[in-house]
Amino acid sequence: MSSKTARAEFHDQTPKAESFRDCVIEGLSGREKSIPCRFLYDERGSELFEAICELPEYYPTRTEMGILEANAGEIGTLMGPHCQLVEFGSGSSRKVRILLNAFDRPSSYVAIEISREALKEASDAVAGLFPDISVVAVCADYMAPMDLSKIPEAEGRRLGFFPGSTIGNLEPAEAINFLAGCRRVVGSKGAMLVGVDLKKDPQVLHDAYNDAQGVTAEFSLNLLARINRELKGDFDIARFAHDASYSEERGRIEIFIRSEADQIVTVDGESFRFKAGERIHTEDSCKYTVTEFQQLAARAGFTAMRCWTDPAKLFSVHLLRPT
C-alpha cells in the first residue's frame, strides 16, 4: 500500500456534547470556584500546550520520549511479535511512533481520542508512515466505557499506552478506576505502559508550571478568553493571573486562575462576584514515587513488570501486567 493512500479506519463513538456553558456557570457558582481542565483545550489552548511541551523548563515531554527511545526495544521484546497498541488519549500520536518503529511486526495501532479532527489527522499520518500496520481511529472519551468489540483482535498481545503523565491529572481514586477499565480493555494476556511524573525538587516542579516566557500563564488565561468569546463573558483578563504551586502535603501541582482585585464578572447574563485573591481551580497534576504508583496500580489489578526512569529521576515509564 502506498504511503500516499494509506488511511486510518475510523470508528465514531463521540459522546453526547457537553455544555460548556452549564459547566462554567455551575463551576463559578460554587463556594470554591472551579472549571474542568478539559475546557482548556480549545484550538488556541491546544496550540499553547504544544508550545509548553517545547519549553526548556517543561521536562516531561522530552524526558519521556528519551526514556521510550532508550527502552522501546526491551519493551517490544517483553510484549513479543504482532503486538496491538491501544493508545488512550492519542493526541498527535508522536510517542507511539517510537514503539511502532521498535516492535517486532506490530499488527495494529488503535488511537482513542475525543477531538475528531486531530484524531483523523494524526492517525492518517501514522497510517502513512506505517503502511503495513492496520491503523484504527476511535473517536471516544477514553475515560468513559467504550465498545472496542468491532476492533480487530490482536494477533499477539494487546498493549495499552497512556503516556504524557496524564495519569497525574486524575485524583488517585479516578486513576484507579481508569486503570481498572484499561485492564478490561487489554485482557488477561495484555499489559499497560504508563508515563508517570515523579516527585522531585519542588523548585523544578514550580519552574515547569511557571515558565519564564509566560506561555503556561497564557494557556491558563486562554480559558477566560474562551468564555468571553463563546459565552458572552466580560472577564478583564488583565485583572486575573495564573497561579500554580506544588503542595508537598498532597504531592501535586495545583493550578488556579487568581483574581487580582475585587470585581464582578458576567457570563451569559449571570453575574459572579470575585474577591481579591479568590481563585478558580482548573487542574491538578499528581506526582508519585515509583513505589507509590506501583501500589496505586496494584489497587487497579495490575502488577509491575518493569519501570524505566531517566538518569536525573525526573520521570518514569511503567510496564504493568494484569494480576
Image (cartoon, rainbow, N blue to C red):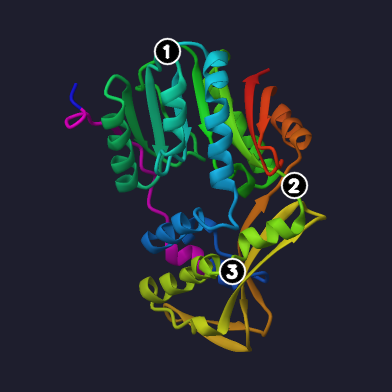
Q: Which residue is denoted by mark 2 in the rendering?
A: 199
Which residue is pictured at 52% across the width and 18% down the height? Answer: 76
Q: Quadrant of the N terminus?
A: top left
* 158 relative to 110 in the view: left or right: right
* 176 relative to 149 in the view: left or right: right
Instruction: Report the number of numbered marks.
Output: 3
Q: Nearer the viewer, residue 172 or 29?
A: 172
- Residue 9 visible to the viewer: no
Determine which quarter of the picture holds residue 101. top left
Q: Amino acid at mark 2?
A: Lys
Tell us which disc is closer to us: 1 or 3: 3
Q: Does residue 135 lie above or below 44 as drawn? A: above
Which residue is pictured at 57% across the width and 26% down the height? Answer: 71
Question: Which region shows up in magenta?
Answer: 3-25
Tell me the CA gap for discs 2 and 3. Answer: 22 Å
**Are dots 2 and 3 in contact, CB under 8 Å?**
no
Of labels 1 and 3, earlier in sequence is 1
